[in-house]
Amino acid sequence: MAVSIELEKKLSHELYKVREPVEETLTAFERCLSEGVGTSKSSCDKVLKSVLYPTKKGGAFHRILKCLVENGGIHKTKKGESININMKLTSCLTDSIDEEFKKTFPNEGNSGPFNGVINTFSLGTEKLTNKECENVKLQLTFLKTEEEKMKTNLNKLIRERKKTIYSSLTTTIEETMKECYDRAKEIRGEGSLKNMRETIEIHVHGSKNVMFAQAKDAMMKQLRDLKSEILEKLESTMKESIELSLKTDGVSIPDVSVELEMEEQNTTDPETSESSVEVCPSTSKTNDKRKLDLQGESSQSPARKRPREDIQGTKREEVILSDVKNTMSRVLKKLPDQDDKLNKFLKNNIKHLETDKREMVGVFGKTGAGKSSLINAIIGVKDLLPSGSISACTSVMIKVEANMRNPKYEAKIEFITKEEWKEELWTLNNFLGDNEDQEKDEDYEDSVEKLSVLYGEKWKNKSPENLLDKQYFKEIPEFSIPRAKELSAKLVKYTRSESNEEDAKDVKRWYWPLVKCVTVRVPNNRLLQHVTLVDLPGNGDRNKSRDRMWKKVIGSCSTVWIVAEINRAASEKEPGRS
């Protein structure tokens, strides 16, 4: 009991060491943001004019402004040029906290007032040396393990919150501006450009004394919430761990010495143990067929070949993991049916061993930058995602993950709903109608293309209601094909807006305007057992459901890779901030 009292005192001291630098950081943010609010109020009218009255004049801006108000102040052309009224209005606020933000949330992630103090947090269990500690060595080891696991989880939490905290400024401005965007997008007829501009200007001028202060408050709330959550998790997790390990009746812990002895015998010599026999290649007909399929793919992609030692190592890891799961399942059966904290904790963590955990990596870049080719190269399957054509353009989000069910390449296609397509049809119809007599730009051509690939020329003579006929919404089954190249050929019309590929020459009808997401499953791929790669087509999609999905996936990604041409990567500025 003396050990637990000593550890609880140490916990209080460590919590103070975390709280102090975090509170100092919050004070610094408050000061920077207050300065940013003042600058934003004085300069927002000028900043807004730079967007609403561009130096390049012409009829094309009428269409651009129309797109901006219809898409919440955001517009991205087909070339990848981005216009964002909300980010422009937020620029003074973000500039005011940029330096402080970099110090607080550095990219390396192991320093700063949040990550840094968490990484130095320690109950010092390894330094406890008195006689009583000799009797609880195992419990202290458990405590150290829980401490490290908790620190890892908190660092992950900080990494995830970093994105939302930074974007909270723009998000608040976007929410404040929504009312004027909704009014502006209803404006039609003669003088509509002038009236849309005035609507936005009047709203900003009337809201500036409130909305920038609200943006500041929103960021400060998220920072304070993060501080509170970190301290609460540190305190509650470690207090519970101390209680579980040092204040629980030992009778409730089952004797698993037999299971441990069995596993020690099986893993002492991996070359001679029974489990090592299981990692040898099978000579059954089923596995031979799979092996031949893989060799066929490897001949096209040398990146898939791995040394025999690496393959055996992978198999050995799988066997060890399987043994651990089997042992823990037997331990689970032996746990008494008691409702105490330790039993709940053990049951919970053993069940988590069965959870399939994967990191999500987003691959983002402009059209033709080579995202699909990069994914193909990383997973070692040359012809999986269609690529190689200069004009090829992936138009939907594609998730690439492991196929754990069978040795075939599979694809699942998720379509937008009829209601979502109806909403988009009305948007496209209104956009094309409003701009019919204007100079045709890329956005106009993009809208025409989207309707033409799905309906041919018929859409020009039909109302949106007629274009919602059920013949355009037939169910399309999942594909399950032994070869990557064959699957790639099947997917072209569901994923591409343009292609000069051989696979696309006979395509008479393209379905990509109706597709929300395509999930491709790859068999026998070690990397994809732990990672899901997402080929992101970009933001600013007029279809709100696809745009929402895009933003949701970006938020779920632990990492985002930005792909750019090598000769432009050094100078090119990507939209948004990290």
Image (tube, grey):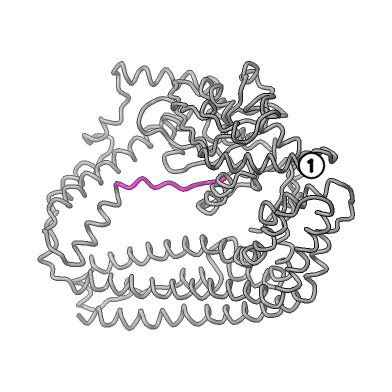
In the displayed structure, 372 sits above or below 140; it is above
Instruction: Judge by depth and name the residue closer to the eye, 460 or 315.
Output: 460
In the displayed structure, 145 sits above or below 10; it is above
Quarter occupied by residue 568: top right
- Which range is magenta? 354-362
Neighbourhood count class around disc 1 (C-alpha, 10 Å): few under 14, some 14–19, many 20 upward? some
Q: Position of residue 415 (x, y in %)?
A: 51, 36
Disc 1 element: loop
425 lies left or right of 355: right
In the displayed structure, 523 sits above or below 283; it is below
359 magenta-colored = yes
493 magenta-colored = no
Quarter occupied by residue 150: bottom left
238 lies left or right of 536: left
Instruction: Judge by depth and name the residue closer to the eye, 261 or 504.
Output: 504
Q: Position of residue 360 (x, y in %)?
A: 49, 47
270 lies left or right of 403: left
Residue at the image position 63 percent from the left and 69 percent from the top: 101
Specify the quadrant that holds the C terminus: bottom right
Disc tally is 1
Q: Which residue is mark 1?
A: 435
Residue 381 in sight in this render: yes
Residue at the image position 66 percent from the left and 32 percent from the top: 451
Q: Position of residue 296 (x, y in %)?
A: 48, 18
Instruction: Judge by depth and name the residue closer to the eye, 3 or 367.
Output: 367
Three-letter amino acid code of the residue under disc 1? Asn
Residue 302 in sight in this render: no
Instruction: Judge by depth and name the residue closer to the eye, 141 or 116.
Output: 116
Specify the quadrant that holds the N terminus: bottom left
Quarter occupied by residue 453: top right
Q: Position of residue 54 (x, y in %)?
A: 86, 56
